[in-house]
Image (cartoon, rainbow, N blue to C red):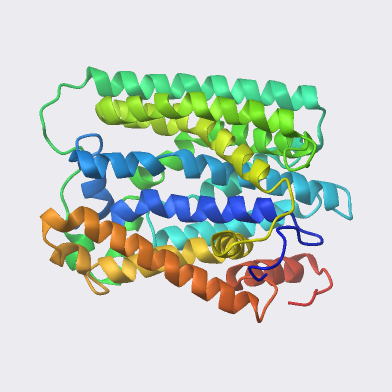
Amino acid sequence: MTATETTTRPGRIVALDVARGIAILGTLGTNIWIFTDPAGIVGYLNTLGSEPWPKRILMQLAQGKFLGLLTLMFGIGLAIQAASAGRPWPGGYRVRAALLLLDGALHYLLVAEFDILMGYALVSMLVCGLVVASARARLWVAVAASAVHVLLLTALVAAIAAEPDSGAPTAPATDVFATGSWWDLVVFRAENVGAFRAEVIFVIPMTIAMFLAGAALYEAGIFDPGSRVLRRKLMLLGAVAAPVDAVVGLCGGEAGVLVARYGVAPFVAVGLLAWIAQFHATPRRAGVVATGLERIGRTALSCYVAQNVLASALCYGWGLGLAARVDPSLRVPFTVAVYLLVCAVLVVTASWWLRRYRQGPVEWLWRVSYQRLVREPATPS
């Protein structure tokens, strides 16, 4: 799509691609602080909620909102696939989810210990049949899952509040990210799989609720031009939640960050989705930014993996090792620079790729693997 084309594309919802692109780059906005910490995710967790204010503010801007948006996108994608399935649903969908689980497991071991694909795959297997159930049944499941999530989050915050603030690190220090080889990191992730995969288990109830919410919003017509009232209500919800999210996340210490990330940010994400849908409700000329985001969204899975590989190569010891070399006083501008560089590379690469192929390389591999497993006729790439 060029800058002179409208934001409608036959057979695709461009706003959905743009929202997916924003979610992918937004999750990088959260994870980039892990890459640029010399101690990686261990250093990130040990300073959570106690960072210097410039860093804390920038972190809070992305914390949880884009993870929530990406989760809604997966729910919407599930609803679209169910609606367009040419066979009884869910049919072979669980095979697709199993392939995503494998992709996530490899991504976790080989690239990033904070992978979210495994969690999405597990929840997809659980709820794929629900997206074609009655609205009443889905509502009850979503409410029950939300209640479980609130109880788990409350218990977690209470446990943190009950611990004396000794100032000691919450996780053992390690220099494997700064000095270890790529294989050292693979072994480190394998040895700590329980700790690093705990979040995936913890957020399953929240993910179930948000998958079902995304599917419901799609069916309610959030992307339809005539659904202005729905979008305005959701944008108002997001506008109310945003300042609450900021205050809780910035002023509540570690517990506040967790409450904001897992409790308030999902409502901000709903408002953000509505704003994106509203912006694209009327056909308009696509600017450079919207075009770049759309292309990221069309290759979302590939870009998610690629951004983590690229940031790892720039920051970790097995690559250029920049995280350990930069002066601590320059950590914030360094992190912003790495983020912008990775985003620029993704936009350029995705645009180049889509001029030649219909989908990203990881998406292509996922589709071909599925077709081979279920013996479905191949479709053009």
Residue 122 position by quadrant: top right
Residue 359 position by quadrant: bottom right
At a point 81% along the width and 51% down the height, the residue shown is 91
Please say if 8 is above or below 312: above
At a point 39% along the width and 66% down the height, the residue shown is 342
Q: Nearer the viewer, residue 273 or 43?
A: 273
Please say if 156 is above or below 363: above
Where residue 153 appears, x then y in whole percent?
42, 24
Where residue 297 appears, x then y in whole percent?
60, 59
At a point 77% along the width and 33% down the height, the residue shown is 220
Where residue 190 appears, x then y in whole percent?
35, 57
Q: Nearer the viewer, residue 104 or 313?
A: 313
At a point 16% along the width and 57% down the height, the residue shown is 330
Residue 161 position by quadrant: top left
Instruction: Tell me if residue 188 can be seen.
Output: no
Decide if residue 345 is on the left or right side of residue 17.
left
Point out the image quarter for the C terminus: bottom right
Instruction: Tell me if residue 287 can be seen.
Output: yes
